[in-house]
């Protein structure tokens, strides 16, 4: 319906409606939405559209609040063109779809001999509630959800178990390489005991003979009889795990003869050298070398 002008006593030729634009959408309007109306009229002089005659911003009628009012005017030869923008916001509350309307507006003109009124007709639209009024209790309206797809963890468990086994094997190897505790399995060998005894000795010349004695006793225990320099090859043949240290064992017996039978003093690192040899023999004894 176009905007119209009315007068109490005469025709409304002084007002000519140029444009009236209502919102493009009239369905699916929900609470909080904004709706705009744009009206452009040409009013003959001396009539004027007074700002004081416009609807008040913030007015709420049946859940429709006037959020903004703007008026622009342009003067032409014998008339004035007014552009009126009315911006509404919907605050209506309804639990079912309903027909609502932007309210009709009556705007008085002044400045002329007659009392003229510019009438803007109401504009109807469909209001859509955010939730239906028949929702009821949420529990009774629950819908079953599709359970998420399960991810197989068997491969991850296998990898974890393999990693733990590798870690355990590595730690066990480190223990058997570096540990000196006799109570551990396969840790009470003759050279392991010799290594522990030599490590406790101070690195002085007075303890060289004692360190040599510990190693000799270890060789004798492993060989089963007293071992001398001439029997090194027989010892290595009977115990091939010590084959890689054959030259070191022969050198040990040569040094031992010099210290024990000639009384020649060793250097400051003699006991350290015996300790290193005992550790290498211990590794061979444990078959780690």
Image (spheres, grey):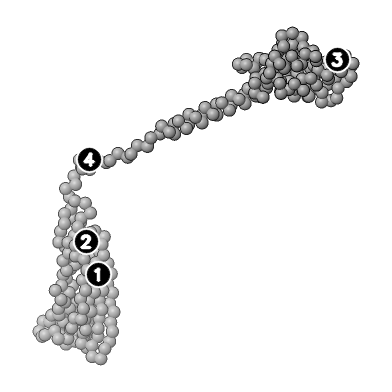
Say which residue label 2 marks. Answer: 29
Say which residue label 4 marks. Answer: 139
Q: CA distance from mark 1 to mark 2?
A: 13 Å
The quarter holding residue 5 reads bottom left
**What x and y, as percent, mark residue 275?**
75, 22
**What x and y, as percent, mark residue 69?**
27, 72
Say which residue label 1 marks. Answer: 36
Residue 282 in view (yes/no): no
Q: Is residue 142 left or right of residue 270?
A: left
Q: CA distance from mark 3 to mark 4?
A: 97 Å
Instruction: Identify whether 37 is placed above or below 126.
Output: below
Q: Is residue 117 left or right of residue 182?
A: left
Q: Earlier in the sequence, mark 1 or mark 4?
A: 1
**Viewer-side label of 3, 1:** 3
Say which residue label 3 marks. Answer: 260
Q: Secondary structure at mark 4?
A: helix
Q: Residues within 10 Å of mark 4 (few under 14, many from 20)?
A: few
Residue contact at pointers 1 and 2, CB within 8 angstroms: no
Q: CA distance from mark 2 to mark 4?
A: 28 Å
The quarter holding residue 103 reads bottom left
Q: Earlier in the sequence, mark 3 or mark 4?
A: 4
Instruction: Identify whether 74 is placed above or below 104.
Output: below
Q: CA distance from mark 3 to mark 2?
A: 111 Å
Q: Residues within 10 Å of mark 2 (few under 14, many from 20)?
A: some
The quarter holding residue 196 reads top right
Q: CA distance from mark 3 to mark 1?
A: 116 Å
- 233 or 72: nearer the viewer: 233
**Viewer-side label of 3, 2:** 3
Name the residue at 85% across, 16% down.
Answer: 257
Name the residue at 77% across, 13% down.
Answer: 231
Q: CA distance from mark 1 to mark 4?
A: 40 Å
Q: Earlier in the sequence, mark 1 or mark 2?
A: 2
């Amino acid at each position: 319906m176009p905007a119209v002008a009315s007068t109490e006593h005469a025709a409304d030729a002084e007002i000519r409606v140029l444009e009236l634009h209502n919102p493009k959408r009239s369905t699916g309007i929900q609470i909080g939405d904004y709706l705009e109306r744009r009206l452009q009229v040409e009013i003959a002089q001396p009539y004027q559209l007074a700002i004081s005659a416009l609807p008040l911003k913030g007015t709420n009628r049946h859940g429709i609040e006037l959020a903004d009012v703007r008026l622009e005017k342009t003067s032409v030869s014998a008339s004035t063109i007014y552009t009126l923008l009315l911006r509404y916001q919907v605050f209506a509350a309804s639990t079912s779809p309903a027909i609502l309307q932007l309210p009709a507006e009556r705007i008085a003109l002044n400045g002329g001999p007659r009392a003229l009124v510019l009438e803007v007709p109401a504009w109807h639209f469909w209001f859509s509630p955010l939730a239906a009024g028949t929702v009821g209790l949420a529990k009774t309206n629950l819908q079953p959800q599709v359970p998420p797809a399960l991810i197989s963890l068997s491969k991850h468990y296998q990898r974890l178990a393999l990693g733990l086994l590798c870690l355990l094997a590595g730690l066990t190897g480190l223990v058997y390489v570096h540990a000196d505790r006799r109570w551990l399995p396969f840790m009470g060998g003759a050279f392991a005991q010799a290594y522990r005894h030599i490590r406790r000795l101070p690195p002085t010349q007075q303890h060289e003979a004692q360190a040599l004695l510990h190693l000799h006793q270890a060789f004798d225990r492993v060989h089963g009889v007293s071992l001398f320099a001439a029997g090194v090859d027989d010892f290595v043949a009977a115990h091939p795990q010590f084959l890689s240290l054959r030259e070191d064992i022969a050198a040990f017996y040569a040094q031992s003869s010099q210290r024990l039978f000639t009384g020649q003093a060793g250097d400051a690192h003699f006991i350290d050298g015996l300790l290193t040899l005992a550790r290498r023999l211990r590794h061979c004894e444990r078959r780690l070398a």
